[in-house]
Amino acid sequence: MFSSSSSFNFLAAVFSLLVVFSFFSKSNAQLNSDFYSCTCPNVSNIVRSVLQQALKSDARIGASLIRLHFHDCFVNGCDASILLDNNATAKIVSEKDAAPNANSLRGFNVVDKIKTAVENCCPGVVSCADILALAAEASVSLAGGPSWNVLVGRRDSKIANQAGANTSIPSPFEDINNITTKFSAVGLNITDLVALSGAHTFGRAECRVFSVRLYNFSGTGNPDPTLNKAYLAKLLKICPQNGSPTALANLDLTTPNKFDNNYFANLQNNKGLLQSDQELFSANGASAVSNIVNTFSTNKNAFFQSFVESMINMGNISPLTGTNGEIRSDCKRVN
Ligand code: HEM
Ligand SMILES: *[C@@H]1O[C@H](CO)[C@@H](O)[C@H](O)[C@H]1NC(C)=O
Ligand SMILES: *[C@@H]1O[C@H](CO)[C@@H](O)[C@H](O)[C@H]1NC(C)=O
Ligand SMILES: *[C@@H]1O[C@H](CO)[C@@H](O)[C@H](O)[C@H]1NC(C)=O
Ligand SMILES: *[C@@H]1O[C@H](CO)[C@@H](O)[C@H](O)[C@H]1NC(C)=O
Ligand SMILES: *[C@@H]1O[C@H](CO)[C@@H](O)[C@H](O)[C@H]1NC(C)=O
Ligand SMILES: *[C@@H]1O[C@H](CO)[C@@H](O)[C@H](O)[C@H]1NC(C)=O
């Protein structure tokens, strides 16, 4: 028979073991930049060279790929859950059909091309989650942005979380407080929010995600008052009333395909495309946020340095490093 004190000790020991295990299975410490140095030393070059090929026919593809990494990391961490297709047998309800993703995410075919090229060199070694992180870095550096050593060693999930994708990914119609809350829910602060929003220095958005700002902002029957008048006129031509909701506008009107800090000057000039972009500069009572916009607008190096730091922070969101994960052989399905 246990005395009450020895059963207490036993429970305490079990509890501390659980704490230790949960620490190791969640720990970021296992991601590092040398993870594939023996098993797939050329992986970064392989990713980069497939991307370079894809950019020749699609100037937007780099932007689309970094967005995949973002939408992956915000839902159950950076575990390639975003890449899984529907599969009733495997109980996968795809995140691709979640509200922020459906008819919006692109680049899955290029991810598959990268995976094939990587598998040809190093079969069964590199996770799809790491491919997204590596492709994000290559996209930024090939567009003129900073380069960095990507931390790798993530494993791929065996599940998807469509409900999580519906609720955890920020919406362009949300205000700064809601978006800040969603970032802090994954451990990212306002410096990360502003720096990472700087990814809107390239890529496109469809009229449907910003046209409410052109015609009937907050039910006023008028355009968003923070929108620059000349920019408004330009956007009205791209998105006429009763026009196609899927017509595209550049997220950065000045240098649409280049990774630079012009996005922040655009915000200062009331030329942010999404409501969530312009709020970083124009929201009432958010001077801590707009101060960061001002810093990044005047100092490109400060932006690049913060961007790299924040990409690493985002890439560290709950990576799968234990037996809950696997190295998928096809990024679209579990093994
Ligand atoms: C802060 C909250 C954010 C919101 C509300 C937001 C929202 C959006 C929306 C609505 C689009 C256009 C989608 C479409 O029209 O189909 C878009 C595009 C894009 N987003 Fe974000 N985003 C946010 C943060 C981020 C972050 C953190 C990154 C990456 C680090 C990112 C990278 C991109 C890129 C590169 C595109 C263009 C994609 C393409 O051309 O295919 N965004 N975003
Ligand atoms: C690494 O990959 C690049 C791009 O595919 C290729 O050009 C190069 O020859 C590879 N280097 C080695 C050492 O395999
Ligand atoms: C669905 O998942 C099952 C079980 O994991 C797998 O055997 C099958 O190949 C998958 N089907 C498709 C179409 O991916
Ligand atoms: C996620 O949102 C989509 C689109 O609004 C909806 O069809 C779907 O049922 C939602 N999924 C879950 C699991 O809540
Ligand atoms: C912001 O979050 C609150 C609380 O979750 C919610 O009630 C509100 O609808 C959100 N606002 C927008 C614009 O999404
Ligand atoms: C956000 O976190 C970073 C560390 O990742 C830190 O350097 C920065 O000062 C923080 N920003 C704010 C506003 O707290
Ligand atoms: C603007 O939106 C409000 C609220 O959604 C609506 O009541 C109003 O009829 C709309 N006005 C116009 C001009 O579409």
Image (cartoon, rainbow, N blue to C red):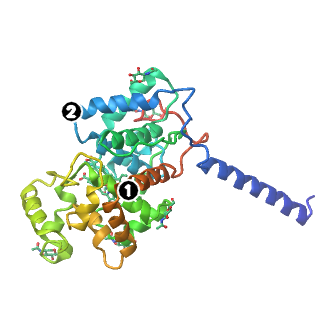
Q: CA distance from mark 2 to mark 1?
A: 29 Å
Disc sitting over residue 303 in the figure: 1
On screen, residue 83 versus residue 6, left or right, reads: left
Residue 171 lies, in percent from the top left, at 32, 62
Lower sequence index among marks 2 and 1: 2
- Amino acid type of the residue that numbered disc 1 sits on in the rendered structure: Phe
- In percent of width and height, residue 185 lies at 48, 63
Residue 207: quadrant of the picture: bottom left
Q: Is residue 37 above or below residue 249?
A: above
User: Of the numbered discs in the image, which one, if any, rests on residue 266?
Assistant: none
Q: Circle 1 — which element? A: helix
Q: Quadrant of the N terminus?
A: bottom right
Mark 1 near ligand 1 (CB under 8 Å)? no
Determine the residue positioned at 47% across, 47% down.
78
Q: Nearer the viewer, residue 161 or 44?
A: 44
Amino acid type, mark 2: Ser
Which is more foreground, mark 2 or mark 1? 1
Tell whether 71 sits left or right of 124. left
Ligand 7 image-quadrant field? bottom left
The picture places residue 44, in percent across and down from the top left corner, at 44, 32
Instruction: Please provide percent x and percent y for residue 204.
Output: 22, 50
Q: Which mark is residue 57?
A: 2
